[in-house]
Amino acid sequence: MKKIITALALTVASSISVMAQKYAYVNSQYILDNIPEYKSAMQQLDQISVNWQKDIEAKYAVIDKLYKDYQAEQILLTEDMKRKREAEITAKEKEVKELQKSKFGYEGDLFKKKQELVKPIQDKIYNAVKKMAVDQSYAVIFDKSSDLTMLYTNPKYDKSDEILNAMGYKAKVTEGGGKSGGSSSSSGSGSSTGTKDSGKSMDSPSRSDEAQPIKK
């Protein structure tokens, strides 16, 4: 009985310790969408992607013409000429596919460009979140826009706007809109019991309004 009571006491003490810890969450995508530099970076990436895609499509158009010309003329060609024309078409197809892979493939030029333009912004968000966690003694700060499904969130524990403010931005919230789940509060801490993995994500309103730097 003594052992059971001791075990129960330890369990209760452990539960109290966990409940005493502070939790909060942010929505990193919402934060990004309210940073003008991020919007500018994404527009730049889109333009780069469009230009590369046009170049690749132009090269495929050349290959398509070569193939059609070959089909129309092959009856007049010798076997040796046919092999040369076929080899030319095959070589050009391989060249374009390699170009496409180098631009849009895994860890290709587009991926590297995104890392160059967007990662510094993401790092700033991470550092701001880390500083808040340390300064305000949060045990965990969840990211609502990650793969983690948050079945229910109390808006007063959403620190997204505080992170934006700490980075020098003020979110512009449309009338009747705002962050998913309501507006943020500058006080309070959340509980881990509000986060569960249900296997399904809940829709949240779009927040594409751009923020402006806070005037000092």
Image (cartoon, rainbow, N blue to C red):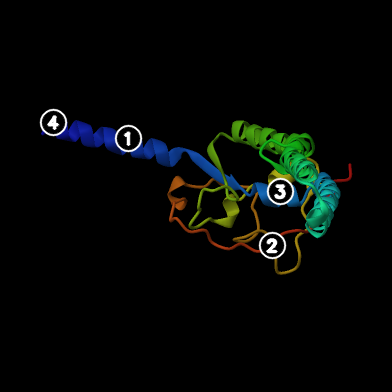
* Mark with earlier residue (2, 3): 3
Mark 1–mark 4 distance (CA, rounded to whole Å): 16 Å
Q: Residues within 10 Å of mark 4 (few under 14, many from 20)?
A: few
Which residue is situated farthest in the bottom direction here?
176
Mark 4–mark 2 distance (CA, rounded to whole Å): 57 Å
Residue receiving disc 3? 31
Q: Is residue 24 left or right of residue 200?
A: right
> Residue 173: percent from the left, percent from the top?
75, 60
Q: Amino acid at mark 2?
A: Ser
- Residue 64: in sight, yes or no? no
Q: Amino acid at mark 1?
A: Ala
Q: Secondary structure at mark 4?
A: helix
* Mark with earlier residue (1, 4): 4
Q: Amino acid at mark 4?
A: Lys
Say if 21 sits above or below 68 in the image.
above
Mark 2–mark 3 distance (CA, rounded to whole Å): 12 Å
Residue receiving disc 1? 13
The quadrant of the image that shows the C terminus is top right
Q: Is residue 184 left or right of residue 169?
A: left
Instruction: Give residue 2's mark.
Output: 4
> Residue 116: percent from the left, percent from the top?
78, 34
The answer to whether marks 2 and 3 mark residues whose Cβ atoms lie closer than 8 Å is no
Q: Nearer the viewer, mark 4 or mark 2?
A: 2
Mark 3–mark 1 distance (CA, rounded to whole Å): 37 Å
Residue receiving disc 2? 206
Mark 2–mark 1 distance (CA, rounded to whole Å): 42 Å
